[in-house]
Image (tube, coloured by chain):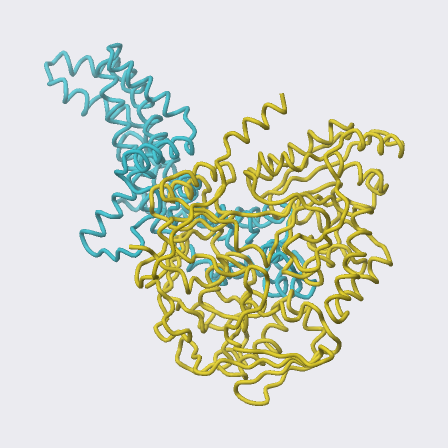
Amino acid sequence: MKKRLIQAVLAAAIPLASINVQAADPVYGGTMDVVVQPEPPSLMIGLYSNAPTQQVAGNIYEGLLRYDKDLNPQPLLATSWDTSEDGKTWTFHLKHGVTWHDGKPFTSADVVFSVDKFLRQTNARLRQSLQYVDSITAPDDYTVVFQLKQPFGPFIGLFETGTMPMIPKHIYEGTDYKTNPANHHPIGTGPFKFAEWKKGSYIHAVKNENYHVKGLPYLDDIYWHVIPDAASRSVAYETGKIDVLPGGSVENFDIPRLTALDNSCSTSDGWEYFSPHAWLWINNRNYPMSDKRFRQAIMYAMDRDFAKNALWNGYGKVAKGPVGSKTNFFNKDLPDYEYNPKKAKALLKEMGYDGTPVRLLPMPYGETWQRWAEAIRQNLAEVGIKTDMVSSDVAGWNQKISDWDFDLSFTYLYQYGDPALGVSRTYVSSNIAKGSPWNNAEGYSDPEVDKLFAEAATAYPDSKRQELYNEVQAKLVEDVPVAWLLELEFPTIYNCNVHNLIDSAIGVNDAFGTAWIEK
Amino acid sequence: MSIQTLFYIGGRLIKGLLVLFVIAIFNFFLIRAAPGDPAKVMAGEAGATDELFLQQLREQFGLDQPLYYQLWVYISNLVQFDMGETYRQQMPVFDLIMDRLPATLLLTGTAFVLSLVLGVLVGVIAASNHRKWIDSAISVAALVFYATPLFWLALMAVLLFSVFLGWLPAFGMETVGANFTGWDRFVDIAEHLVLPAMTLGLFFTAVYARMARTSMIETSRADFVKTAKAKGMKPSRVTFRHTLRNALLPVVTLAGLQAGQMIGGAVLTETVFAWPGIGRLMFEALFQRDYNLLLGVFFISSAMVVLFNLATDLIYCIVDPRIELAK
């Protein structure tokens, strides 16, 4: 019965290859309509680092660098950069002639202010990395020098717009950042300028005529529409009112239908920097999860290929371990946890599992996650693990994880291109603390793992880091502190008349500076 | 208006204020009873945080204070007509509500008038043709719309009128970026209004139709109606002057209830049609645990219920002069 279901689902899934469009010359003009979900709380990217904020504000603000789809740094506000022999001094040369949207020049003083003052105070994620930075200085208007305390491997990966946006010093210096009136009218250096925000309806940005990259942008303006219902977002795209559905903005079961429409294109590119990694939290503190064999049994019990094909329309990749395959320092030689209920049963028998039921928390992020929880529940039941589903909304779910009040729970987190930024936080024992659902919530603690992650973050050069990360990945895959599910991909669906939509590793979160619409 | 009526209204308003006060305190505790932390919800959207950041947020929202103190701040601000700031948008709650209120009132007001007029009319037609096919047809239709879930109806309407026929826009309140003015803008908004207002209004149309029909049939058997007919009055005049006026009372009661829900009652419709109104604001605030905003919407909604209850009682007197206002 189940096999037939899989086949039916596979048959229904439309071939995913997107249509190749002939390269044509870009044309100027046109308005692009994009969906943003949910409505961002604010567009001040230095204060709010969530996805919808960045999706819009990534067009208004800029960082020093961008990253191509292989995560190589590319010039943006910095034209070149070099590092000292020991990897501790980084010098960035800024682009000349860049102006803020209000006409003031962008200089090294803005960079020092943004990183050292503003973001150090407001951006929790960057703050973790800035502890490796000893000083940030500006020898002249167009040079910035970062002096590190010790080499920090992921340093060159910190400069994208969402992580380290440039904030105008002349507007924010000496003010209370959170209440500065400019937060309601963001000023950046990006290819589009903020025009209007009709709360609950749309956000409007218009072309920056003085953009520092000559000839860009192509589009006249962009509207981000706020449409709260997933089915309505699909309809809005179907009726041609919307040109772009960023990844994750429609339910997965609508994707085959929408990509099959006339003149509809799709791509799973643009997630390389984030590499969203999905796993099951396993509360390592309590029986039976405290037994390694039980956790391994969960890995063998799950049919992850089924989930990928049936629930995610074939997008994504079965996760091998803690590091995603697109993230730097992925260990290619890890053993597989194949779907093998027999092995799972044997492990459970060996440990003498007494059938204690476990609580499973689905992720309250829409229908797909609910269905996924049901699929896993069935997988676990087949090897003799009984589960009780505990549902709640986002706030309640956050609370349960941060209070360690769970046995198993779905989640996914971004990796930000480097294990030191987005992976180690889940496994090092210094990160075990109640009150946050994004640290080491499973309570796994191993001194060797702690040591390897700490050494790998500051080892130099990269080959040394790779060695250490290979070792820690192998160790974690053996211990199964959490049960890895999939490397997620959220396809972006768009009207084929739109070209060059995604040209960096942060996808729709980057500026649509090079995007253009065929007439 | 007599002095007596004015006194009555004044008394009711004072009682209403007391009720609102109690409701405000009750709401405060009700919301805090739900598990979850606004700071964590907000940090969660960023996918990463540290304790310092959470602490900053809680301080900013005043959530680091003891609960009784937060209640005191809330109530004392409320007395001065200050509803605080929203956590998420960093805007005064009152401004945000006022910003979204016109959209909701337009939608619910249209649906209200539409359902009341249409419902009563259909009900009268059904009653006048009692036990004929048209009566059965209306009754069946009313039952179907009464029983159909709102969101399903909305989605089906979108599918038919927007996707297949392409007659009406599927979402929003205006064509974004068109910058219409004057008459063009009116037409544009009207076009956007049709589907959500229909969806929202159909349920109550059905309720009014059933109510009006039953009440009309009952009243038409009364002696004074027979008398009116016997003295040779025109049938239409009998229906509207004698029967309808007396049959209207239960409909007014129900209309008062519907009017009281005009602010918060359109959550589903606003969500499906991306209508930028209050219902959606409340719904989102609930999931984000935006306490201030949620309390603000609750407060305005309860004030509306109190006001409309009073208005309903006054309308009773107009419809039926035999009803007197109790002192």
Quadrant of image for the N terminus of chain A: top right
Tell me the residue at 59%/78% (across/down): A81
Q: Colour of chain B?
A: cyan
B325 horizontally vs A336: left or right: left
Q: Residue furthest bottom?
A: A140
Q: Does the image show residue B79?
A: no
- Residue A101 position within the rendered picture, expressed as x and y whole percent measured from the top left: 40, 75
Nearest the eye: A517 or B238:
A517
Q: Is residue B294 above or below residue B110?
A: below
Q: Residue furthest top?
A: B131
Q: Does the image show residue A512?
A: yes
A493 horizontally vs B181: left or right: right
Tell me the residue at 11%/14% (across/down): B231
Quadrant of image for the C terminus of chain A: bottom left
Q: Residue furthest front?
A: A22
Tell me the residue at 25%/58% (across/down): B179
Which chain is tinted yellow? Answer: A
- Residue A480 position within the rendered picture, expressed as x and y whole percent measured from the top left: 79, 46
Nearest the eye: A137 or A486:
A486
A459 horizontally vs A18: left or right: right
Nearest the eye: A441 or A472:
A472
Q: Is residue A272 above or below residue A295?
A: below
Nearest the eye: A271 or B239:
A271
- Residue A373 position within the rendered picture, expressed as x and y whole percent measured from the top left: 65, 36
Q: What is the total number of numbered labels drawn onto the structure image?
A: 0
- Residue A200 position within the rendered picture, expressed as x and y whole percent measured from the top left: 41, 53
Q: Is residue B126 above or below residue A363?
A: above
Displayed quadrant of residue A177:
bottom right
B108 horizontally vs B191: left or right: right
Displayed quadrant of residue B155:
top left
